[in-house]
Image (cartoon, rainbow, N blue to C red):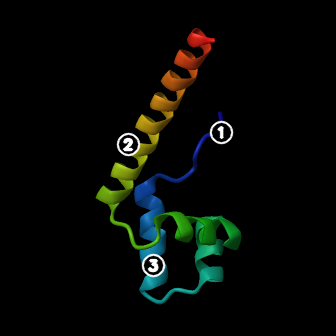
Amino acid sequence: MKRKRFTEEQIIAVLKEHEAGAKTADLARKHGISEATFYNWKAKFGGMDVSEARRLKALEDENAKLKKLLAEQMLDAA
Protein backbone atom coordinates (compact mmCIF):
# COMPACT_ATOMS: atom_id res chain seq x y z
CA MET A 1 0.00 0.00 0.00
CA LYS A 2 1.20 3.48 -0.85
CA ARG A 3 2.53 5.50 2.07
CA LYS A 4 1.22 9.04 2.39
CA ARG A 5 3.81 11.74 2.73
CA PHE A 6 1.47 14.34 4.19
CA THR A 7 -1.10 14.12 6.96
CA GLU A 8 -4.47 15.84 6.73
CA GLU A 9 -3.20 18.50 9.13
CA GLN A 10 -0.22 19.26 6.91
CA ILE A 11 -2.39 19.40 3.79
CA ILE A 12 -4.79 21.84 5.44
CA ALA A 13 -1.85 23.97 6.58
CA VAL A 14 -0.63 24.19 2.97
CA LEU A 15 -4.12 25.18 1.82
CA LYS A 16 -4.29 27.85 4.54
CA GLU A 17 -1.00 29.29 3.25
CA HIS A 18 -2.58 29.56 -0.19
CA GLU A 19 -5.64 31.30 1.25
CA ALA A 20 -3.29 33.76 2.98
CA GLY A 21 -1.97 34.83 -0.42
CA ALA A 22 0.90 32.50 -1.34
CA LYS A 23 1.13 31.51 -4.99
CA THR A 24 0.42 27.94 -6.02
CA ALA A 25 3.74 27.49 -7.82
CA ASP A 26 5.68 28.75 -4.79
CA LEU A 27 3.83 26.42 -2.42
CA ALA A 28 4.35 23.46 -4.72
CA ARG A 29 8.07 24.11 -4.89
CA LYS A 30 8.36 24.75 -1.14
CA HIS A 31 6.60 21.53 -0.12
CA GLY A 32 7.89 19.31 -2.93
CA ILE A 33 4.55 18.58 -4.60
CA SER A 34 3.17 19.16 -8.06
CA GLU A 35 0.60 21.81 -8.79
CA ALA A 36 -1.81 19.04 -9.80
CA THR A 37 -1.43 17.49 -6.34
CA PHE A 38 -2.16 20.88 -4.80
CA TYR A 39 -5.35 21.26 -6.81
CA ASN A 40 -6.42 17.69 -5.90
CA TRP A 41 -5.92 18.55 -2.24
CA LYS A 42 -7.88 21.76 -2.71
CA ALA A 43 -10.76 19.83 -4.28
CA LYS A 44 -10.83 17.32 -1.43
CA PHE A 45 -9.89 19.41 1.62
CA GLY A 46 -10.69 22.97 0.53
CA GLY A 47 -12.52 24.93 3.23
CA MET A 48 -12.08 22.24 5.89
CA ASP A 49 -10.71 22.48 9.39
CA VAL A 50 -8.48 19.79 10.87
CA SER A 51 -11.35 18.33 12.91
CA GLU A 52 -13.52 18.06 9.80
CA ALA A 53 -10.72 16.28 7.93
CA ARG A 54 -10.35 13.78 10.76
CA ARG A 55 -14.11 13.17 10.71
CA LEU A 56 -13.98 12.65 6.92
CA LYS A 57 -11.18 10.11 7.32
CA ALA A 58 -13.11 8.24 10.02
CA LEU A 59 -16.23 8.11 7.84
CA GLU A 60 -14.22 6.86 4.85
CA ASP A 61 -12.71 4.09 6.99
CA GLU A 62 -16.12 3.09 8.34
CA ASN A 63 -17.58 3.09 4.84
CA ALA A 64 -14.80 0.80 3.59
CA LYS A 65 -15.47 -1.66 6.43
CA LEU A 66 -19.20 -1.68 5.71
CA LYS A 67 -18.60 -2.27 2.00
CA LYS A 68 -16.34 -5.20 2.83
CA LEU A 69 -18.95 -6.70 5.17
CA LEU A 70 -21.65 -6.31 2.51
CA ALA A 71 -19.48 -7.99 -0.13
CA GLU A 72 -18.75 -10.91 2.23
CA GLN A 73 -22.44 -11.32 3.03
CA MET A 74 -23.35 -11.32 -0.65
CA LEU A 75 -20.74 -14.01 -1.32
CA ASP A 76 -22.08 -16.11 1.55
CA ALA A 77 -25.60 -15.75 0.22
CA ALA A 78 -24.56 -16.81 -3.29
Q: Secondary structure at mark 1?
A: loop
Q: Marks 3 and 2: which is nearer the front?
A: 2
Q: Which residue is mark 1?
A: 2
Disc 1 residue crowd, few under 14, some 14–19, many 20+, Cα 10 Å: few
Which quarter of the image is occupied by the C terminus? top right
The relative height of residue 18 versus residue 77 in the rendered view (above or below) is: below
Which label number is shown at residue 17? 3
Q: Position of residue 33 (x, y in %)?
A: 66, 65
Question: Residue at image x 58%, y 76%?
Answer: 27
Total residue callouts? 3
Instruction: Specify the amino acid type for callout 3.
Output: Glu
Question: Residue at image x 58%, y 86%?
Answer: 23
> Horizontal placement of 54 versus 78: left or right?
left
Q: Earlier in the sequence, mark 2 or mark 1?
A: 1
Q: Earlier in the sequence, mark 3 or mark 2?
A: 3
Question: Residue at image x 57%, y 9%?
Answer: 76
Q: Secondary structure at mark 3?
A: helix
Which label number is shown at residue 58? 2
Disc 2 residue crowd, few under 14, some 14–19, many 20+, Cα 10 Å: few
Q: Marks 2 and 1: which is nearer the front?
A: 2
Q: Position of residue 29 (x, y in %)?
A: 65, 73
Instruction: Specify the amino acid type for callout 1.
Output: Lys
Cα–Cα span, label 3 and label 1 = 26 Å
Instruction: Tell whether label 1 touches label 3 (CB within 8 Å).
Output: no
Question: Residue at image x 61%, y 14%?
Answer: 75
> Horizontal placement of 50 versus 39: left or right?
left
12 or 76: which is nearer to us? 76
56 or 49: which is nearer to us? 56
Instruction: Specify the amino acid type for callout 2.
Output: Ala
Q: Secondary structure at mark 2?
A: helix
The relative height of residue 32 versus residue 56 in the rendered view (above or below) is: below
Which quarter of the image is occupied by the N terminus? top right
